[in-house]
Amino acid sequence: MSYRFARNSALGTLASLFTTFGNFAGGLIIARLLGVEGAGTVGFAFWVVTMTVAVGALGIPPSLIRYLPELTGQGEDKQAADLSAVLFRIFLASCAIFFGGYCLYAFWLSLAPVAGPADDVLRSPLLWILVGVWCVTQLLAEFHLWYLQGMQRFGQVALLTVISATCQLSLLFVCAYFFGVFGAVIGYIAGTAVQGLGAFGVLSLKARLDPTLKRRIFQFSVYRWASTITSAFVFSRMEVFFLQVSWGNDLVGFFTVALALSGLASQGPLLLTRGLMPLFSEKVGLKDFDGIHSIYATGTRILAFLAFPACFGMAAITPELLPLIYGERFAPAIPAAVILMVASAGVAASSIGGTVVAARERTDFEFFSGLAGAVLSVLLGLTLIPWFGLIGAALTRAIVQLSVVAVGNWFIGHHLKCPVPYASLARLMVAAAACAIVARATGLIFPGFLGMLLSIAVGGLVYLIGVRLLNALPKDDIDRLSSLLAHLPGPIGKLASPALRLLSSRD
């Protein structure tokens, strides 16, 4: 791995770390201040924004991170600038259309007779105007951050993310305390606005694209747009809609908390992948497919090495951890959180595969696999969730996501000729399962906060021993992971190399 990739990954890790922390801390603030029902209302609004962004982005942000590195790597800086400007003009039109749509919906609500409880916040026109603003700022933030990553300006991404998270959490706490759900939405708007305003710096009315490049981008964007919409059913909280319709805000609040905690478990390992797409795109431009295959195998093993124990281990301590963080009133979310954490281990470990598929411009497969996943999501949402509620929502998400991952691994191995390291993944999973079993047993023997800390320590030790005994991670991977972590700031980078070398059963 090149020094630039390691540096980009380290900066991307810092940016993702603050994003993850901001989202988790924001959800915690909302849960503590607004309770189960308020958290459910904000969670539903968050889902609406997520789905709107999936549709309104038109597949443009992924096109930036796919083609900008290729163009700049070939010295076509002018064409890269024109590409950004042309796509941004289209993006602005999309923002205007969706904001207008939410304003019209708010106007219709102001005229329509109230159906349901008079205090139902979801019937408030003001909420939907705010949601429309949130959608616009989120869309602009998506464009700007993906543009910066495509230009490999990961330092700016990290700085923007730190500022955004700070503004979001500060305003979220103050506004939610005084204005409830409306204040929470204003806090999220502030955070995304900080990231999105810089997107206007790429605007140019004179930019033009090469016709050949335009055709490539059009085909890529259309398929990526379609696959993003279908994937939204699989990965973007579609279960929230079915819970809201069948069970109401309370179960949405429980499910939102379960998702947040499971996301916290899986996001840590994913922080290391932010520099991969530009690297893959460069190698596609150079026709270095062997390099892509090598990075894919190594990255998948390293991600699994980090994700499996994080997800399995957190699932083991969730019965103590979730009430400690969110309070006893959210205890019904524990079983759903455990299911989601176990499933998220496989999803996280396979995430690099999606990057490979996109870099190879096989967005057609992303669309059709996402479409199949969307159909399965709707079918399970109409059957499992109405009958089994919260557990049904967790099972729906787990079944759909793992099915899509399995099909994706098959496609990568058979059609892209990119070998999936199944043997290493199986050994890592065995070690992580042993970690979880020992951690849970320790927690049962020694209950309470101190017992939870002991569970983490004992489970981690068992995992490291298992990795070494099973030789689950090749020595070359350990060396590459050490090199990657060495660029992290503080004592983590200095302690990473000697600690990781202990995992190798061969010197």
Image (spheres, rainbow, N blue to C red):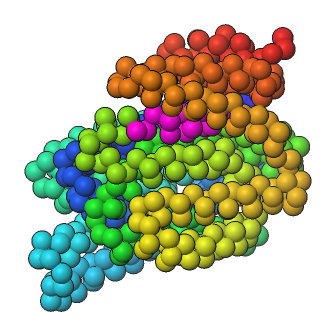
Residue sitting at the far front: 445
> Is residue 205 depicted above or below 354 in this figure?
below
Most distant residue in the bottom direction: 112
Left or right: 179 in relation to 353? left
Q: Which region of the structure is painted magenta?
A: 305-319
> Is 334 within the magenta?
no
The N terminus sits in image quarter: top right
Q: Is residue 382 left or right of residue 507?
A: left
Which residue is drawn at the image coordinates 25% and 55% (left, top)?
Answer: 36
Image quadrant where residue 117 sits = bottom left
Residue, x 18% and y 81% (percent of image)?
116
Depth check: 260 or 358 in front?
260
Spot occupied by residue 474 in the image (x, y as percentages of width and height): 81, 26
Residue 379 in the image: state x and y as whole percent: 56, 77
Front residue of 345/173: it is 345
Which quarter of the figure is the C terminus placed in? top right
Let me know if residue 249 appears in the view: yes
In the image, residue 313 lies in the stretch drawn in magenta: yes
Residue 13 shows in this picture? no
Give the percent coordinates (x, y) of residue 232.
Answer: 53, 66
Q: Could you tell me which residue is drawn at 33 percent across and 70 percent down?
A: 247
From this view, report whether residue 351 is shown above or below residue 315: below
Q: What predominant SS class does the magenta segment belong to?
A: helix
